[in-house]
Image (tube, rainbow, N blue to C red):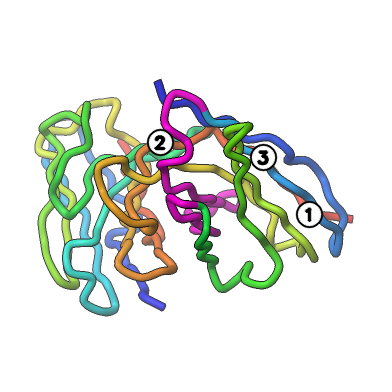
Amino acid sequence: QVQLLESGGGVVPPGRSRRLSCAASGFTFSNSALHWVRQAPGKGLEWVAGLSIDGNIAFYGDSVKGRFTISRDESENTLFLQMNSLKPEDTAVYFCARGHGSIPGTIIPLESWGPGTLLSVSS
Amino acid sequence: DIQMTQSPSSLSASVGDRVTITCRASQDIRSSLAWYQQKPGKAPTLLVYVVSRLQSGVPSRFSGSGSGTEFTLTISSLQIEDFATYYCQEYYSTSPTFGQGTKLEL
């Protein structure tokens, strides 16, 4: 059974950094495209970043490009999102998600999601 | 960037109703279109991908159609558990975009 569990959320002052983690189990981590999606309070879904199956190619949304970095540790089956220069508008629930296992590529439908972790950027 | 526009933004319906949600893309996205359902306080779940393929475990009352720039999600006979918010998503571009959501209310 696929399981994804995010951690690392909390309250962070503007301008600071934070790293989110997503612990994965129940599937072949090293053979999966992995993504971060966020949802600001009361708002819709916004795709943040995605990492290719081989872990070598990263894609970012325009609002986070240059500030956020997606990466993974295969030995720990963990996905990360390093967030720098945080802004109040980064306040959101952050979900990690796994790309559909039957579709090749990186930018693909997201078939498994974690419950999310809330990040609040506030002084 | 590709813009995804859903309509309506909200919809009132009753159990047993047939409902249709529309999603329009700002450019041709071929068949790279998925639909998700989200209930309050929960993560989204994938319903449909490649326009019309039902994700495993999704009831057959859900169906998707369309091509190019216009797509629809239809629920043939609403059940109480279907009242939720629905999002379309294009995955044609390298910066995939979600629609703004359609809240389905009783």
Q: Amino acid at mark 2?
A: Ser
Residue A70 sits in which quadrant?
Answer: bottom right
Q: Which residue is mark 3?
A: A21
- Side of A23 relative to A110 (left or right): right
Instruction: Look at the numbered disc 2 and give the secondary structure of its residue.
Output: strand
In the image, which residues are magenta?
A25-54
Residue at the spot of label 2: A112
Separation (CA) of disc 2 from disc 3: 16 Å
Find residue A29 and name its label: none
What chain does mark 1 sit on? Answer: A
Residue drawn at (43%, 48%) of the image: A33
Mark 2–mark 1 distance (CA, rounded to whole Å):
27 Å
Earlier-in-chain disc, 2 versus 3 = 3
Q: Subunit of mark 3?
A: A
Furthest residue to the top?
Answer: A1
Quadrant in which the N terminus of chain B appears: bottom left
